[in-house]
Amino acid sequence: MEARRYQYLKKEERAGRISDLRLQPRYPFEHEGSLICTYVADFCYSTPDGMVVEDVKGRVTPVYAIKRKMMKAWYGISIHEVAEVKGEWVDLRSKV
């Protein structure tokens, strides 16, 4: 599913709808100089509305749910979560 999303995002980039597509950007969580863990997103890219950090999800694991909260607390970033449903990309957070 992640590979299909990458192909889709590359088309969006070629069409000029997104830019600066990066694969697996890393976001370290450190406290007082110690690395706690690192979140590795699937993709990061720019849109006219700003930077998007994206994760392709089949299911949400407990570890991912914690890292999602940490991304908001540490970096102020809400992760854009998508899944492929019947050949269409669905924003999972809009269903919450």
Image: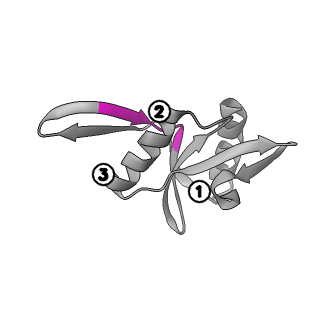
- Whether residue 39 is in magenta: the answer is yes
Disc 3 residue crowd, few under 14, some 14–19, many 20+, Cα 10 Å: few
Q: Residue furthest bottom?
A: 49
| Residue in front for this viewpoint, 49 or 94 | 94
- The amino acid at mark 1 is Ile
Residue sitting at the far front: 62
Disc 2 vs disc 3: which is toward the camera? Answer: 2
Which residue ends up furthest to the right in the rendered image? 86
Write the residue at 74% across / 51% down: 90
3D distance between C-alphas at marks 3 and 1? 25 Å
Residue 63's label in the rendered image is 2
Asked whether, in this view, residue 56 is left or right of residue 73, the answer is right
Alpha-carbon span between mark 2 and mark 3: 16 Å
Q: SS of the residue at dot 2?
A: helix
Q: Quadrant of residue 72?
A: bottom left
* For the residues bearing labels 2 and 3, Cβ distance under 8 angstroms: no
Please provide the residue range marked out in magenta.
Answer: 37-43
Q: Is residue 69 above or below residue 32?
A: below
The answer to whether any part of residue 84 appears in the image is: yes
Residue 33 in the image: state x and y as whole percent: 12, 36
Q: Position of residue 5 (x, y in %)?
A: 69, 39
Dot 1 corresponds to which residue? 18
Residue in the image at 66% along x and 50% along y = 14
Mark 3 = which residue? 74
User: In the drawing, what numbered circle is on residue 1?
Assistant: none
Percent across and percent down for residue 56 are 63, 39
Q: Nearer the viewer, mark 3 or mark 1?
A: 3
Q: Residue 16, how many percent across, how many down?
A: 63, 58
Question: Mark 1 vs mark 2: which is more N-terminal?
Answer: 1
The residue positioned 40% from the left and 36% from the top of the image is 39
